[in-house]
Image (spheres, helix red, strand yellow):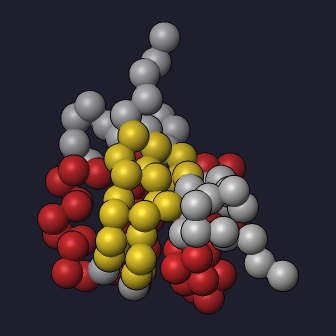
Amino acid sequence: MSTKNVLRIEGELTIFRAMELKPIILAVPPVTEIDLSGVTDLDTAGVQLLMLAKKTALAQGRDLTLIGHSPAVIEVFELLNVVAYFGDHLVMDSRSPAGASRS
């Protein structure tokens, strides 16, 4: 019954794009999935935006799933130890095009 509203982010998810992406991520109808497979660079402003998106979804009683993590996203999430923050709403996909598996 519910439809997916997927946002695919390409390129940088940094302070330079956070303000541009914020209204898109928080738009109505709400985004239900954020595809991060095309993200080439992620900084703390980008992480904060993803955290805001999750917090907003939880406050509205809906799900938000992060999918297709690029190596840049995985590196920053692990460095900042925020994987647990996203909990079940985080899908670490080793089949992502950038080869996200780590040894």
At horizontal 26% and vertical 48% (from top left) the residue drawn is 26
17 horizontally vs 79: left or right: left
33 horizontally vs 90: left or right: left
Q: Quadrant of the C terminus?
A: bottom right
Query: Is 21 situated above or below 88?
Result: below
101 horizontally vs 60: left or right: right
Query: Is 61 situated above or below 95?
Result: above
Foreground pick, 95 / 81: 95
Kindly tell me whether residue 85 is visible in this rendering.
Answer: yes
At horizontal 53% and vertical 74% (from top left) the residue drawn is 73
Picture quadrant of residue 12: bottom left
Foreground pick, 89 / 61: 89
At horizontal 37% and vertical 52% (from top left) the residue drawn is 8
Kindly tell me whether residue 48 is visible in this rendering.
Answer: no
Residue positioned most to the top = 1
Foreground pick, 100 / 59: 100
Picture quadrant of residue 21: bottom left
The x and y percentages for residue 71 are 58, 76
Foreground pick, 88 / 91: 91
The x and y percentages for residue 85 are 61, 66
The x and y percentages for residue 67 are 55, 52
55 horizontally vs 49: left or right: right
Instruction: Tally the marks.
Output: 0
The x and y percentages for residue 54 are 46, 54
Query: Is 73 situated above or below 7?
Result: below
